[in-house]
Amino acid sequence: MNTFKLTINGREQEIEADPQMPLLWVLRDRLGLTGSKFGCGIGVCGACTVRMDGAVTRSCVFPVSACVGRDIRTIEGLSENIDHPVQRAWIEEQVPQCGYCQSGMIMAAVALLEQNPEPSDADIDAAMTNLCRCGTYPRVRRAIHRAAQLMAEA
């Protein structure tokens, strides 16, 4: 076990863990940040998506030892009152069904809109690689367009 200093949602945390422990389990089991979900365990589905230094990162395959000195953002750090434009758009467009993939989808959508504030449908389809077993992709696309509007109005 090693001790790691991590910056998560703007707060410095000191964590004891095996260097190869995936960030997902540090977030969920050590810090109680359960918004990021375990889905596939191989970095494909996106349920575990967080942002690291602004980039979309699959936390289930990212070892905690590689997180030191990086800015990690989880769904819990996106807003205090569920009022981020992407979260508001998700609610307005009634995106979730089961909801399991939604925190990862939202974090990926935030990254997309920060890089491309007016994405086309093709841009959204290319950027949103998260899997949704409920098939809410058309609602995800509408919500991203709505979030872009909300961000432009702010």
Image (cartoon, rainbow, N blue to C red):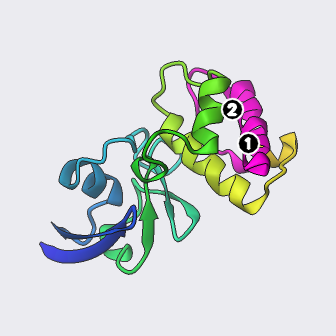
User: Which residue matches tag 2?
Assistant: 140
Q: Position of residue 16 (x, y in %)?
A: 15, 69
**Viewer-nearest of discs 2 and 1:** 1
Mark 2 neighbour class, 10 Å CA radius: few under 14, some 14 to 19, many 20 or more: many
Q: Is residue 153 left or right of residue 108?
A: right
Instruction: Give x and y (percent) for residue 84.
Output: 57, 45
Residue 123 appears in the rendering: yes
The residue nearer to you, when weighing 11 against 38, is 11
Locate residue 68, reporting x and y percent. Answer: 35, 78
Q: Nearer the viewer, residue 15 or 60?
A: 15
In the displayed structure image, the side of residue 49 where residue 62 appears, left or right: left
Name the kind of residue labelled 2 in the image.
Val
Give the residue at mark 1.
Answer: 150
- Expressed as whole percent of the image width and height from the top left, the position of residue 149 reads 79, 42
Q: Overall secondary structure of the magenta stretch?
A: helix
Q: Which residues are magenta?
A: 127-154
Quadrant in which the N terminus is drawn = bottom left
Quadrant of residue 15 within the rendered picture: bottom left
Task: State how many labels appear.
Answer: 2
In the rendered image, residue 61 lying in the magenta stretch gets the answer: no
